[in-house]
C-alpha cells in the first residue's frame, strides 16, 4: 500500500534477521553462535534519527543475546523481542498507529505486516512473495547496507534528501570514531 | 520425472547441507565448527506440516552434532544420518514408497535419488548436473530461503496455495516468538 | 595453453584458498581462525581418484593448521605447503612433469603457473587477470563446488564422462556416510 | 574527480571494512568477534609498494583488535584508527596532501572523502551513492580481491602495468610462503 493520504510517518520499525544481517544463523554444536551484521546501516539510521522514532524488533528468541549485543549495547538502539505474527498488535499496544509506521522486514510472514502499516520496505533478499507486497524493495541485501539504502530512500521521499557532499552529523558525532 | 499419475505425495524428505545451509563447512584447526542456516525455512516447513510427513536427512557425519542442534533440538524436526547414495534404500527400509516422496537435495550424487522419487526439488545453488535432473529448481539458494520457497511451491502444486495475507498457524503458534 | 599433443595428464594439483574455500580468511583478534570449505568437492575428487594422482597445495602458512584438518585429516588427501611463486619448481623437484599436470588455482600469481602446466583451471571467483590465462573457467565459485565441477570437466575431457544416473563408487564407499 | 593535472599520486590510503573485508561484522553474544578478509589483496599491495606509500585506515573502534591482527601484525602494513568523517583532516595533519592521495573506501560517508583526494576508488559492494562519486569502481567486491584489482588498476594507470607472466617480487619475497 502507498502511504495513506494526509499521514506523515512517525516511526521506523526495523526487523533484524535478514534485514540488518545476512539472514544466516551460524550454528555450532552448542546452538546459535553468531550473526553477521553489515556496514552503513548504523550510519544510515543515525541520519534518520532526527526525523523518526526508530525501534528495532526481532522474533528470534534463541539468538536474542547476539542481537541485543549488536543493536542495544553497541548501536544504542531501542530493541524488543516481538514475533512477526504479533507485530501489528504490538504496534497498537505500544501506542504506534500502524498507518504512521514505516516498517522494514524480509520474512515469509511479513507481507501481513506490510498490509497494515503506512509504508513498507523489503531488502533485496526478502522472501520472494513478501517483496511483491512491499512499497519499496532496496537494491541492497540485508547485511549489505539494505537498511542504509532504506534510510536514504525515506529521507528523500518523506523529509530532506541526503547529500553525501553536504551533510551534518548530530552533536553525538563524537561517536563516529567507534561508529560500527 | 513428473509426479507419477494417481499418486499423492505423502512425505517431504529434505537434505541439510547446501539446502538448509549455504553449503559451507566452517573449519577451525579443530575441525568442522560451524554451519550457516538460513531464514524462513523453519516457517515454510511448519506451513507444510499439516499436509506432509517431514523428515530431514544428512550425510555429514562429522558435522552431525551441529545439524542435530539446529534441526532436531531447535526446530524439533525428525532427523537421520543417511548418506546420499543410500537414501533410496533407506526410504524403502523406512516404509516410505519413493514414488510418494518429494525429495529436495543439492549434491553431485542427488540426481540418482531424484530419479527414483515422485517429485524432486533442487535449490539454485545445487550442483549444475543435479539441477538438470530436478523437477523444480528454486530461485533461492540454500541458506537463503530455498526450503521455504520449495514449501510454498509444494503447497500450490499439490495442496492449497499459501496466501501471505490470509493464513493460519497451528495452535503451536506460541512457538513463533522463538521460531528461528 | 591447450593440452600438449601426445601428453596424457597424470596429476591434478589443486590450490586451497579461493578454490576449495570461498577465499575468505575469518579473523578474530587472535588471528586466522576459520576457513569455509564447500560441498561436492570431496565427492568430485573421489570420482577422479582412479584416473589421476591428486595433490593439494596451499601457500597459506598461518592458516595451514586449518587446511591440514580439512584436507589431510578429514578428506585424507595429500597436502603440501608451497607458495604460488614456487609451485612450478616444486612440481619439478617432486618428479611431476608440469606438462602432465592439470592445475587449478585462483590467485593473482597463478597465471604464471598456468603458463607452465599441461592444462589449467580457474574457479569463477579467480582474480580477473588470472581467468584470462586459464584453459577452463568453472561456472561455480570456490567454496560452491568449483572443484567438483572441475573434476566432472576433467573426466569428460580426458577420461570417461560422469553419468549421474550410472556411476560406481570405490570399495571405500563405506566412507560415504562420513564423506563431508 | 579525475587526477589533478601535474600531480603524481604518492599515497594509497585504504579503508578496511567492506574494502579489505566483506563488510560483515560477525557477532556473538560477547560482541564483534570476527571479520572476513579476502584473497589477493595482500599480494596486490606488495606489488604496489615500490611505487606508493600505503596506509590503511579503519573507523571501527570496537573491531580494531581484529583489524590490527590482520593488517598490522600479519600483513605488516601501517594502520590507524580514523573515522571516515575525520579522514581528510587526518590526511592534512599527517602531512599527506589530499590531492596526492589515492583513496579507496566503500561507506555512506566516503563520497565526501572522494571529493577531496586526487583519485578515488570504490569496491563493487560500496554504498550505491558512494559509487557514483568514485573515479573508479572495481568489478570485485570487498573480500573478493577488490583491493588487488585496485592495485593492478593503479599500476596500469599511473606506473607500470602488471604482467602476470613477467613480474618480480621484492627481496622480501621470502615472505611469500606465509603471504596470506
Image (cartoon, coloured by chain):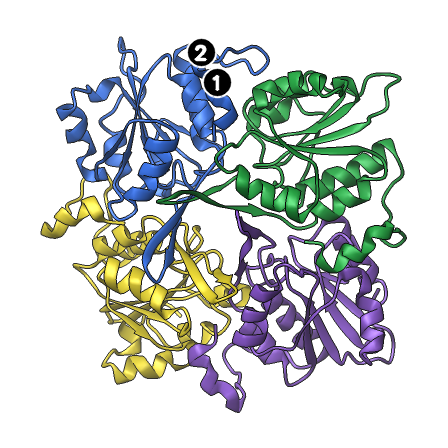
Chain colours: A green, B blue, C yellow, D purple
Residue at the image position 43 percent from the left and 58 percent from the top: C123
The image quadrant that residue B117 belongs to is top left
User: Residue at left 46%, top 24%?
Assistant: B43
* Relative vertical location of residue C22 with respect to residue A136 in this rendering, above or below: below
State the image coordinates of residue B150 (x, y, percent, origin top left).
Answer: 42, 25
Residue at 70% across, 17% down: A93
CA gap between label 2 and label 1 equals 7 Å
* B53 versus D171 height, above or below: above
**Labels 2 and 1 touching (C-beta < 8 A):** yes
In this rendering, position of residue D111 left or right of residue B138 = right
Quarter holding residue A176: bottom right
Q: Is residue B117 left or right of residue A108?
A: left
Nearest the eye: B82 or D25: D25
Judged from the image, the secondary structure of the residue bearing numbered disc 2 is helix
Spot the residue most to the left: C171
Picture quarter with the N terminus of chain C: bottom left
Q: Position of residue C145 (x, y in %)?
A: 37, 50
The tag on residue B174 is 1
Residue at 29% across / 24% down in the picture?
A: B1
Which of the chains bears the disc numbered 1? B
| Residue A59 percent location from the top left of the image | 56, 29
Outermost residue on the bottom side: it is D171
- Residue B166, image quadrant: top right
Residue A153 makes an appearance in the image: yes
Q: Give residue B172's position: percent from left, percent from top.
A: 43, 15
Q: Residues within 10 Å of mark 1 (few under 14, many from 20)?
A: few
Observer-nearest residue: C63 or C48? C63
Residue under pointer 2: B171
Same chain letter for marks 2 and 1: yes
Which chain does tag 2 point to?
B
Amino acid at each position: 500500500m502507498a502511504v495513506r493520504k494526509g499521514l506523515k510517518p512517525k516511526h521506523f520499525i526495523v526487523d533484524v534477521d535478514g534485514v540488518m544481517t545476512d539472514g544466516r544463523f551460524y550454528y555450532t554444536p552448542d546452538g546459535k553462535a553468531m550473526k553477521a551484521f553489515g556496514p552503513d546501516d548504523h550510519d544510515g539510521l543515525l541520519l534518520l534519527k532526527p526525523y523518526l522514532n526508530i525501534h528495532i524488533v526481532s522474533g528470534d528468541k534463541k539468538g536474542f543475546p547476539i542481537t541485543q549485543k549488536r543493536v542495544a549495547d553497541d548501536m544504542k538502539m531501542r530493541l524488543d523481542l516481538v514475533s512477526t505474527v504479533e507485530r501489528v498488535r504490538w504496534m497498537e499496544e505500544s501506542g504506534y498507529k500502524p498507518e504512521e509506521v514505516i516498517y522494514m522486514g524480509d520474512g515469509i510472514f511479513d507481507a501481513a505486516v506490510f498490509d497494515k502499516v503506512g509504508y513498507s520496505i523489503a531488502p533485496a533478499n526478502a522472501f520472494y512473495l513478501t517483496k511483491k507486497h512491499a512499497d519499496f524493495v532496496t537494491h541492497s541485501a540485508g547485511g549489505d547496507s539494505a537498511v542504509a539504502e532504506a534510510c536514504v530512500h525515506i529521507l528523500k521521499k518523506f523529509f530532506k534528501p541526503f547529500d553525501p557532499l553536504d551533510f551534518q552529523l548530530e552533536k553525538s558525532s563524537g561517536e563516529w570514531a567507534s561508529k560500527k
